[in-house]
Image (tube, grey):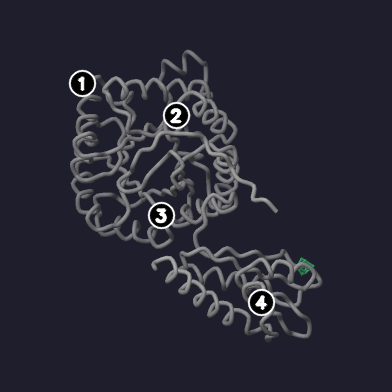
Amino acid sequence: MEAIEIKRRRSRRIYVGKVPVGDGAPISVQSMTNTPTSDVAATVAQIRAMEAVGVDIARVSCPDEESTAALKEIVKQVSVPIVADIHFHYKRGIEAAEAGAACLRINPGNIGSAERVREVVRAAKDYNCSIRIGVNGGSLEKALLEKYGEPCPEAMVESALNQAKMLEDEDFFNFKISVKSSDTLMMMKAYRLLAAACDYPLHLGVTEAGGLRAGTVKSALGIGTLLSEGIGDTLRVSLTADVTEEVKVGFEILRALGLRYRGVRIVSCPTCARKGIDVEKIVRSLEERLEHISVPLKLSVLGCVVNGIGEAREADIGVCGGGNGKALLFLHGEQKEQINADEVVEKMVALAEKAAAERQAEETK
Ligand code: SF4
């Protein structure tokens, strides 16, 4: 079967540190710390936890001078580029650029005057720092709310383009834009309008999406639908949950759309009366034990031979229930052996680790 490919919107290329964003670059996955940024050790530990699950870009809030002072140390201790999140205080933006932030999330419309915008842009240029204009449906300018009567996609896009113009007037084009809302349909429409109105790279997100389950569903719908239409260059899944979950869900969305693969993907069935192995328990164990693998690997775990053989043939490593407490084990599409059901996890972990090491070695050749 011919692969179904998403045709991505053409956008400009910017860089967040070493990470390219836009113009066909791999869609990067971002997350944000929730430790006090002034607490260097805690913030570095959280960014490292995100790095372990593959984050490309990490954002930290910089509400005060202590935070921008700490940023300098944080940047030194982590590998991924850091985005400094600034609201209102243009001086924090300048300090963050000086401290080594790779990108400033700052809205030029919020910082007071054209002179202040000029100063922030000068710092961004001097320190090779990109900017994200981050429009949020919940905090639109008063004038736009009066014009449109309520937050709406058109008002969000007008805000974004007005702010883009402020940067363009300073001869600054090294920026991306987000138009987030906690309303999934509103954010989707805003991004579609914005995508048609400019060629800047777009940072996707459903803001304040909720807890792990609701937030994952909302983000998969909002971010995933836009990505399926070719819109979006980088993303952040916003969850009231452990920050590493944001990264994992981000990669799951990309993987579900065939846009980017990282780590182990497990195809598994919901099980029914035909199941010959404990699929749920096996999948849970595999997810936990194979989290450290970053190279793409496809596993299948199915309860019986009905669909199990077909799926196992498409996977790097596959297993299905075979009856009488036995399971059939497949490697690269070939049936390898019949094993006891209680051996499945250990065998699959060993084979997955071996396959991952081989793939890694091939990639680094
Ligand atoms: Fe049921 Fe077998 Fe299908 Fe799993 S693969 S849902 S056990 S029929």
Say whether residue 210 is left or right of residue 94. right
For mark 4, what is the residue?
Answer: 330
Q: Which percent across, then down, holds residue 136?
A: 44, 31
Q: In terms of sequence position, does the residue under pointer 1 or pointer 2 come before the other?
A: 1
Please state, as top left, top right, bottom left or bottom right, where the C terminus lies in the image.
bottom left
Q: Residue at x 22, y 36 (%)?
A: 92
- Helix, strand or loop at disc 3? loop
Q: In terms of sequence position, does the residue under pointer 3 or pointer 2 come before the other?
A: 3
10 Å crowding of disc 3: few (<14), some (14-19), many (20+) = many
Q: Which percent across, then down, holds residue 36?
A: 29, 50
Q: In terms of sequence position, does the residue under pointer 3 or pointer 4 come before the other?
A: 3
For mark 1, what is the residue?
Answer: 115
Extreme residue in the top direction: 147
For mark 2, what is the residue?
Answer: 199
- Helix, strand or loop at disc 4? strand
Looking at the rendered image, the disc whose residue lies closer to the viewer, 1 or 2, is 2
Q: From mark 3 to mark 1, how far is it between C-alphas?
A: 35 Å
Q: In terms of sequence position, does the residue under pointer 4 or pointer 2 come before the other?
A: 2
Q: Which percent across, then down, holds residue 115?
A: 21, 21
In the displayed structure, 111 sits above or below 271; it is above
Q: From mark 3 to mark 2, how far is it between C-alphas?
A: 25 Å
Say whether residue 3 is left or right of residue 28. right
Looking at numbered disc 4 in the image, what kind of residue is underneath it? Phe
- Helix, strand or loop at disc 1? helix
Q: Residue at x 74, y 85 (%)?
A: 325
Looking at numbered disc 2 in the image, what kind of residue is underneath it? Asp
Looking at numbered disc 3 in the image, what kind of residue is underneath it? Val
Mark number, residue 55: 3
